Image (spheres, rainbow, N blue to C red):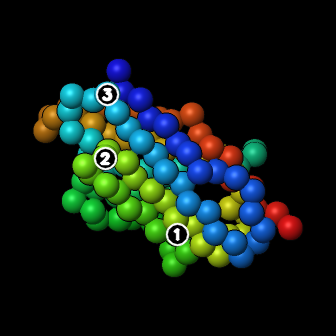
């Protein structure tokens, strides 16, 4: 069974930085796209950033220039470095991993980690 575990959330003042990690394990298939999502109270879950197995990254407009996604394929772990944090970045951050074969793709979500940006 594939497990996805986030770590690194917490509280920070506006303008501060936080780093999140997501470790995936248990798959007999290769991990494909890995992504970070967030959900603020009363809002829908939204994509923050994603990265392919080849290292191509995609960012939401709100994350561009401030957040950096990266991955270590050898460890099946990916990361989100968040700089210049704003109060509106406050949310539960979830990681999602896609895995499978060339013809079938599965996905699994982590349970989330809270990020709070407040003075």
Return the disc, 2 or 3, that comes first in the chain's sequence: 3
- Classify 29 as above or below 31: above
Q: Residue at x 49, y 37 (%)?
A: 5
Query: Tag on residue 97?
Result: none
Mark 3 neighbour density, 10 Å: few (under 14) some (14–19) many (20 or more): few
Disc 3 target residue: 26
Which of the pair 53/103 is nearer the observer?
53
Residue located farthest toward the right when viewing the structure as drawn: 119
Indicate which label's residue lies in the foreground, 2 or 3. 2
Disc 2 target residue: 75
**The N terminus - image quarter:** top left
Determine whether the residue tagged by mark 2 lies in a helix, strand or loop: loop
Kindly report the distance in space between the C-alpha atoms of the residues bearing marks 1 and 2.
21 Å
Determine whether the residue tagged by mark 1 lies in a helix, strand or loop: strand
How far across and down, in percent of the image, does residue 45 sit? Answer: 59, 46
Q: Residue at x 13, y 38 (%)?
A: 102
- Quadrant of the rendered structure where residue 111 is? top right
Mark 2 neighbour density, 10 Å: few (under 14) some (14–19) many (20 or more): few
Which of the pair 19/51 is nearer the observer?
19
How far across and down, in percent of the image, does residue 32 sit? Answer: 26, 46
How far across and down, in percent of the image, does residue 57 sit? Answer: 35, 65
How far across and down, in percent of the image, does residue 107 sit? Answer: 36, 34
In this view of the protein, can residue 62 be seen by the observer? no
Disc 1 target residue: 67
User: Is residue 98 toward the left or the right of residue 84 in the image?
Assistant: left
User: Is residue 98 toward the left or the right of residue 90 in the image?
Assistant: left
């Amino acid at each position: 069974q594939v497990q996805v575990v986030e770590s690194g959330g917490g509280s920070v003042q506006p303008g501060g930085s936080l780093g999140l990690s997501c470790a995936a394990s248990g798959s007999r298939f290769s991990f494909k796209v890995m992504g970070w999502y967030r959900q603020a109270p009363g809002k829908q879950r939204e994509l923050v950033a994603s990265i392919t197995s080849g290292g191509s990254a995609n960012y939401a407009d709100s994350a561009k220039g401030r957040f950096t996604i990266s991955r270590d394929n050898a460890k099946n772990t990916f990361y989100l470095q968040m700089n210049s944090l704003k109060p509106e970045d406050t949310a539960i951050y979830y990681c999602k991993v896609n895995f499978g074969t060339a013809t079938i793709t599965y996905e699994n979500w982590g349970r989330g980690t809270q990020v709070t940006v407040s003075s």
